[in-house]
Amino acid sequence: MVCPRCVEAVHNLLERAGYRTTAVTLGVAELDEATPADLETVAPLLEAAGFELLMGRAEQLTEQIKTVLADYLEHLRTARSPLTTSAFLTDRFAATYSHLSKVFSRTAHLTIEKYLIRLKIERVKEMLSYGELTLNQIADQMRYSSGQHLSNQFRQVTGYSVSEFRRLMLPERVSLDAIA
């Protein structure tokens, strides 16, 4: 779950299935002790709604890292002196960056850095679709060293140049929880 609508959707799904929730937050759903979960029943319900049940601690940590990285993007855009990715993550988790990176790479099958690049490019696509900012302004907001650096990375990830994307205004935006 990566947004408030996801939280609400999971809460409603579990309630309709007869489970009483005590808390539903990003990535976590806690059930009332009186209604223990039958995982074989809950998993298909979640999957039918586009969610997946995460069983292992590594999978849970990876999803938490993804959520924190989405927060990091906003930190990048708004902070005068933004923290590095590693500093931001280690501030949020009681673990070293090395540990977080290894767990993430093993379960997500890509590095934190590559995931963050994909996340940034999705945000850039969103900003481009609004048509309000120049490429250099977007590059500044997203903390790229230059518009050219952003342009090169954009082409690497999407296969399109920024001008091609603008011209075609491709609706190929990827939902944040589908980035992998």
Image: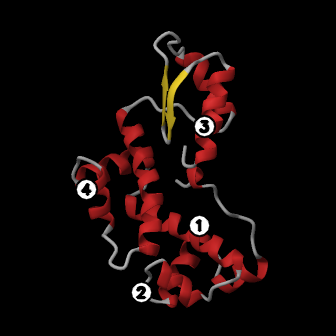
Which mark, by number, is residue 122? 1
Q: Residue at x 28, y 62 (%)?
A: 86
Q: Residues within 10 Å of mark 3 (few under 14, many from 20)?
A: some
Horizontally, residue 26 falls left or right of residue 46, namely left
Number of numbered labels in the structure image:
4
CA gap, disc 2 and disc 4: 24 Å
Reply above or below: 13 against 39: below
Look at label 3 and name its amino acid.
Phe
Upstream in the sequence, badge 3 or badge 4? 3
Foreground residue, 155 or 24?
24
Instruction: Find disc 3 in the rendering and name its residue.
Output: 51
Look at label 2 and name its amino acid.
Ser
Look at label 1 and name its amino acid.
Glu
Q: How is the image coloured?
A: secondary structure
Horizontally, residue 66 falls left or right of residue 131, namely left
Horizontally, residue 40 falls left or right of residue 16, namely left
CA gap, disc 3 and disc 4: 27 Å
In which quarter of the view is residue 45 placed?
Answer: top right
CA gap, disc 1 and disc 2: 18 Å
Which mark, by number, is residue 97? 4
x and y percentages locating residue 21 in the rendered image: 54, 24
SS assignment at label 1: helix
Q: Residues within 10 Å of mark 2 (few under 14, many from 20)?
A: few
Instruction: Find disc 2 in the rendering and name its residue.
Output: 145
